[in-house]
Image: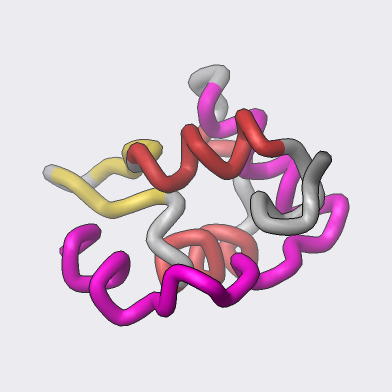
Amino acid sequence: MRSEHIQKMAPDLAAPPLTHEEFVSLRDGAKGSMHRIPIEHKKRLIELGYIEELLGGLRLTSDGRARIAAGKRSPTHSK
């Protein structure tokens, strides 16, 4: 699923912006608090390929880890 998401993204396009709250949810999920992420954030983060449902739970993807490493701003806009 993640590879399909990556193939759909053009390399020169910026990642979609996340609200501060969505970014905090993504970051908190990486720290083991996936169960605390609001449902609307879960849906959007899954849609963007940053988290995925796996065996009844949620898991951070490598795209999600890369987004956290890039910071709140989209990776192509960070300096």
Report the colour scheme: secondary structure
Residue nearer the viewer, 56 or 79:
79
The C terminus appears in which quarter of the rendering? top right
Observer-nearest residue: 13 or 73?
A: 13
Whether the magenta-drawn stretch holds residue 20 is answered as yes
Looking at the rendered structure, the number of numbered marks drawn on it comes to: 0
Give residue 27's quadrant in the image.
top right
**Image height of 77 relative to 72, above or below:** below
Does residue 15 sit above or below 33 in this rendering?
below
User: Residue 8 lies in what quarter of the image?
Assistant: bottom left
Q: Using the image as rendered, state which of residue 37 and residue 52 is in the foreground.
A: 52
Outermost residue on the right side: it is: 20
Quadrant into which the N terminus falls: bottom left
Q: Where does the image place residue 65, in percent across and percent down from the top left?
A: 48, 33
Q: Which residue is drawn at the image coordinates 55% and 33% (left, top)? A: 29
Measured along the vertical axis of the image, is residue 67 above or below residue 4?
above
Residue 50 in picture, x, y percent from top left: 45, 52
Q: Taken as a whole, is the magenta stretch helix, strand or loop?
A: helix
Q: Position of residue 30 (x, y in %)?
A: 52, 26
Give the residue furthest to the top: 31
Residue shown at the point (60%, 66%) measured from the top left: 15
* Residue drawn at (62%, 61%) of the image: 41
Write the start and end of the magenta stretch as one range: 1-30
Estimate the x, y position of residue 19 in percent, counting from the top left: 82, 61
